[in-house]
Amino acid sequence: MSSLTSKEIHQLSEETGFSKLAIQDWYKRFIYDCPTGSISKERYLNLYRSFYPRARNSDTYAQIFFTAFDEDRDQALNFREFLRVVAVTQGTDEKAKLELAFKAYNRNQVETNLPRKQLRTMIIAILDLAETSDEDEEGGYEEKREKIIEWTMKCLGLDEKADISKREFIRRCRDDVNLYEFLSFRSVPKPNCPDGDLKGKEKYKISITTGSEGKKLARSKSSGTDANVYLVLHGETSSSESIHLQHSQTYKDSFEHGHTDMFTQFLPALGEIKGATLWHTGDKNQGWYVDNMLITNEATNTTTYFPVQRWLDSDEYDKMTKVELIPNQPPGYAEVNDN
């Protein structure tokens, strides 16, 4: 799919509920990151590995959902399949989320009942994603797992029968908020919420693009950095705590020349984003050119754009490695007094 026709955009809008402008924006970003027009299964698994770097095992869960998303069975996700996933996982339709979960848990056999054995496999996959190998040393984790499995089976009535229909699965999950939070796709524990406590928090996607130009000085260096990068978001009602931006969802090595790195954070509601503080702790050999930053609050479906367009460098330009940002306004460089 080299470009989207008006007919294709209209069809995707009807299928997903996204506006035509939103679809064009998603397509532009999709093709930028996936110039072949699809996400391979291996890359999909790698995204999960980078998103959950401390998970006991993320591959099983990722493979199960990849199979559910890959409708044409070509071992890759094209844009249409990808957008349908986005529409369900970012939407508020509880039934759609649970239908997707049932389809994945049931190995894509949508019209048959979900066997207890397959659900047990899926619960273990969820726990493997949520838990870390560090918990092995604490002891008792197997007992904890069995209690969670037992609780889930009892809530679904599978402690007394061998399988469950899709209709009953959806009804029971919608009637029990804890069961819904555990089994629906969107509720898988997130990397920055190790305790699983998402109450009162909203999902923020952070996208930072490192420039693709070298320094315009006699000594040319790459625009990327290996330094530790931090961010504070300033909202209308409150500011976030300092966020250490690590484990990019798009690249193994963060903030490399010309790359766009994506991060997900669950934060207390901040209200409308009014500003941000961005900095790194690198020395003179770790200067960083930041092109732009996008902050998307998925709870409110709003995106704030920061056109940074400057170096954060301790030995050149204005020698600042920390900058205060205002939406839609490049900060420029501070005046330097050479006297």
Image (cartoon, rainbow, N blue to C red):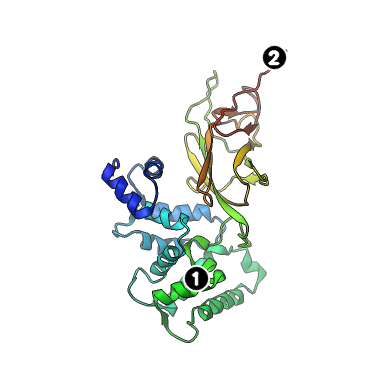
Q: Position of residue 302 (x, y in %)?
A: 52, 45
At x 34% / y 70%, what residue is drawn?
Answer: 110
Secondary structure under the numbered disc 2 in the rendered image: loop
Q: Position of residue 64 (x, y in %)?
A: 41, 64
Q: Which residue is mark 2?
A: 338
| Disc on the earlier residue, 1 or 2 | 1
Q: Amino acid at mark 1?
A: Arg
Cα separation between marks 1 and 2? 66 Å
Image: 183 above or below 249: below
In this rendering, the label closer to the viewer, 1 or 2 = 1
Q: Which residue carries the number 1 mark?
A: 174
Q: Residue at x 40, y 74 (%)?
A: 166
- Which residue is at a point 62% across and 22% down the rendered structure image? 317
> Residue 4 sits in which quadrant?
top left
Where does the image place residue 246, in percent across and percent down from the top left? 58, 46
Relative depth, front residue between 110 and 195: 110
